[in-house]
Amino acid sequence: MTPYPISLNDVRAASIALQGVVVRTPMLENADVNKKLGGRLLLKAENMQRTGAFKIRGAYHRLLGLSEQEKSRGAVSYSSGNHALGLARACQMMRTSAVIVMPSDAPVAKQAAVHAMGAEIVTYDRDTQNSADVVQQIILESGRVEVPPSAHPQILAGAGTAALELLQDAGGALDAVVIPCGGGGLTAATAVVMAEASPDTKVYAAEPELFDDTRRSLIEGQRVPNPKGRRTICDSIMTPIPGEMTFDINRRLLAGGVTATDDEARQAMRFAFEYFKTVIEPGAAVGLAAVLNGQIPIKEKTVGIMITGGNIDAVRFSDLVNTTA
Amino acid sequence: MTPYPISLNDVRAASIALQGVVVRTPMLENADVNKKLGGRLLLKAENMQRTGAFKIRGAYHRLLGLSEQEKSRGAVSYSSGNHALGLARACQMMRTSAVIVMPSDAPVAKQAAVHAMGAEIVTYDRDTQNSADVVQQIILESGRVEVPPSAHPQILAGAGTAALELLQDAGGALDAVVIPCGGGGLTAATAVVMAEASPDTKVYAAEPELFDDTRRSLIEGQRVPNPKGRRTICDSIMTPIPGEMTFDINRRLLAGGVTATDDEARQAMRFAFEYFKTVIEPGAAVGLAAVLNGQIPIKEKTVGIMITGGNIDAVRFSDLVNTTA
């Protein structure tokens, strides 16, 4: 029993349930980078996960809990892209249907990939409509089961398996873990895993400078939104406000929030390209960026970074990586 | 005792000697890619090795065999880039000096990186000069020890550690291994490892279509050169003729040679970007390209591919990946 919606045991059980379904992604480390930074930098490469992001862990785990009747009605969710991809693939694997509500400005490559996996896409306007309202309308009309990006214990437990693997591969000695944070699901799941399995590990949420709702919410002790109308290159974590279930965990367990500017995110993408030969999408780069910009101390420490996704098309990747200072 | 310059035991010993020096690079696998190809595709990600290529394995292992007197005189070698980087870093770590003979058209990024690691660069013209002659002149003048890209048992044993790791991570069940092949060192070392540890595994050399000297040499039973004056985007394996020591192994152990056009190499780079989120340089992509172009059968088989390097600057990477069909 823990005071949270999930416990370490739930995550362990999810790990077993997901074996053979999700990739046990590698932990990347580079001695030259460590020397340069004066500490150990460990990247959990969930960009190399199926569908290019950690999201399939939670989505598939949630679908495992559906009845045959629920599966026959199918799933519905909203997502700017990565959860959509993970859910669409999970539904395809479980032979159930999916409707995904996506912002109209979601990257074309992500929309095309979701469509290619057989999911139906419904778009909405990020500034004038509320995605949750659109989803609720679809549920009322179709009886579909909502598989939200994070607000469900089975989804949190699935996401937490990435944190468990990182802790195992790091040999347990993590001073800090930094998680790019949108709604806060992976962050909350990681926080629960660390609180039980490695209580000295500090857990930080990393956000784009202009979408630092979790950081400010942690300071104020309650959920505060981001102003509307803002933009960032970090599309995958451009969330309006922390999730209720996830913030209730994060509020109690996080060491704090850190931020990165769009240019710092670009520089982190380029750093990952040059030193780790790995492709990171902008929203997945803010954790690494917060180490490189000095907000997360790494000297003589071991810092784990969740690399949450790598879904970016080649032209946009080139534009972002080649225009940084 | 084996009839080759190295045995599996030499490679095992090198593995132990290199522990903590080289990265145990991940083996990448993607269930969606496997489904698409109808077989298991395993990528040994030596692009994530220190200095971005497998070369440091052999170079460092060779330096371990030098006397104090030899170390005081320093090392010399020729290389189009990756061996230069590996040797320069290895010399820096062992506190000895390095002179590297590089073709004048070697990628600027590689030359700059070699220079940054403290090595001295001497350039030569690929079409009118012979790199070996330039190296011999330097040896005569300075007494430096040659650390060639592949033609030394300790270098082969070091390179072979990558093949050993791949075999371990694959759980032993490899139907084939494909190695991008320049001088043929990694290919020969892999062939020896497989011949002893997994004799049913077929080993193939993969080359650029216009630099298929090993493929043609295997057919003719003797070393034949590439015509002068040709170019390919695969700079790292643009070698004039198979190495003598390496071809003597490859001639006896390889299943054959396969090729990829420059455009197929580009497509393989893009495939790796999209599905594996990993950065491959052109010369390291020909193995994957030979699977994608159908020369290496993969249906219902397990095929390991050596991803030999990822040293390419962001602008050139973008140009190559975005201009493919």
Image (tube, coloured by chain):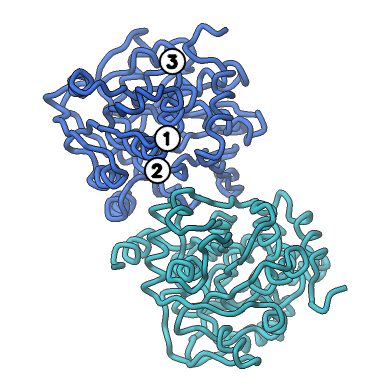
Chain colours: A blue, B cyan
Residue type at mark 2 is Thr
A259 relative position to B155: left or right: left
The residue closer to the viewer here, A62 or A233, is: A62
- Mark 1 chain: A
Residue type at mark 1 is Ile
Q: Position of residue A259 (x, y in %)?
A: 37, 28
Query: Which residue of the protein is positioned furthest toward the right in this rendering?
Result: B1
Picture layout, residue B136 above or below residue B65: below
Q: Position of residue A8 (x, y in %)?
A: 57, 18
Q: Secondary structure at mark 2?
A: helix
| Same chain letter for marks 2 and 1 | yes
**10 Å neighbourhood of mark 3: few (<14), some, or many (≥20)?**
many
User: Which of label 2 and label 3 is nearer to you?
Assistant: 2
The residue closer to the viewer here, B48 or A192, is: A192
Q: Position of residue A38 (x, y in %)?
A: 59, 39
CB under 8 Å between callouts 1 and 3? no
Q: Which label number is shown at residue A56? A: 1
| Residue that mark 3 sits on | A250
**10 Å neighbourhood of mark 2: few (<14), some, or many (≥20)?**
many
**Residue at left 64%, top 53%?**
B170
CB under 8 Å between callouts 2 and 1? yes
A195 relative position to B221: left or right: left
* Quadrant housing the N terminus of chain A: top right
Q: Confirm whether residue B111 shows in the render.
A: no
Q: Pick whichever of labels 2 and 3 is earlier in the sequence.
A: 2
B216 relative position to B245: left or right: left
Residue type at mark 3 is Asn
Q: Pick whichever of labels 2 and 1 is earlier in the sequence.
A: 2
